[in-house]
Amino acid sequence: MKTTRYLVLIFTSASLLAAELPDSSQDQTPTGALLTEEAQLVANQWANWMVEGTKASEVFLKAIDQENYEDSWNQTSVITKLRLRSRYWIKNLENTRKPLGKVKFREMESQKPSMDPPNLPKGPYMVIYYNTSFEHSSDSGELITLRLESDGQWKVLTYQVTN
């Protein structure tokens, strides 16, 4: 039975957030201007984070595709490293990802940012889902959860292949 995961694509832009706020041209109070400016700063930050998160996931996937599982381990979050030793990470990828073979096709289907999800340390997170076709599994997907670390870098919290 095929497991299908659906994620909603959320695209944050300054215009979308600003559209939900009161029209600052009608409200000339400093508070109204501050909210609009603040909303724009938040939207810009998330837009930058989404680009950075995508780049981090692509670098991570390149290491996985090249069977450089130790390098993929080095790209994981502190949380992952505290809960799972590198040898288990590597062995798990050798047993689950390697048998699928080379990637024939990969396309990002969705990217979902999240702030302070339940049961995890506070901060920004991102879930990215790729439609992927492998040499030995033509209808698969890859789900990557990333976390923005204290050093300002997006790191992989989880990696899963769905069939």
Image (spheres, rainbow, N blue to C red):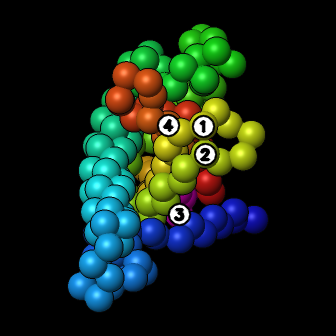
What residue sits right under mark 1 in the picture? 122
- Quarter assignment of residue 15: bottom left
Q: Is most of the magenta stretch helix, strand or loop?
A: strand
Residue at left offset 69%, top offset 63%: 3
Find numbered disc 4 in the image and state the secondary structure of the residue it sits on.
strand
Report whether residue 63 is seen.
no
- Name the N-terminal-most of marks 3 and 2: 2
Which mark is nearer the camera, 4 or 2? 2
User: 57 and 162: which one is in front?
Assistant: 57
- Name the N-terminal-most of marks 4 and 2: 2
Q: CA distance from mark 4 to mark 2?
A: 10 Å
Q: CA distance from mark 2 to mark 1?
A: 4 Å
Find numbered disc 2 in the image and state the secondary structure of the residue it sits on.
loop
Find numbered disc 1 in the image and state the secondary structure of the residue it sits on.
loop
Which mark is nearer the camera, 1 or 4? 1
Q: CA distance from mark 3 to mark 4?
A: 27 Å
Q: Are the residues flagged by discs 2 and 1 in contact, CB closer than 8 Å?
A: yes
Task: Point out the image quarter for the N terminus.
Answer: bottom right
Task: Point out the image quarter for the C terminus.
Answer: bottom right
Q: How many residues crowd around disc 2 within 10 Å: few (fewer than 14), some, or many (20 or more)? A: few
- Identified by mark 3, the residue type is Asp
Query: Percent from the top left, x then y, of residue 125?
Result: 51, 45
Residue at left offset 29%, top offset 88%: 26
- Identified by mark 4, the residue type is Arg
- Name the N-terminal-most of marks 1 and 3: 1
What residue sits right under mark 4 in the picture? 147
What residue sits right under mark 2 in the picture? 116
What stretch of residues is rendered in magenta?
139-143
What residue sits right under mark 3 in the picture? 139
User: 73 and 116: which one is in front?
Assistant: 116
Residue at left offset 39%, top offset 35%: 154
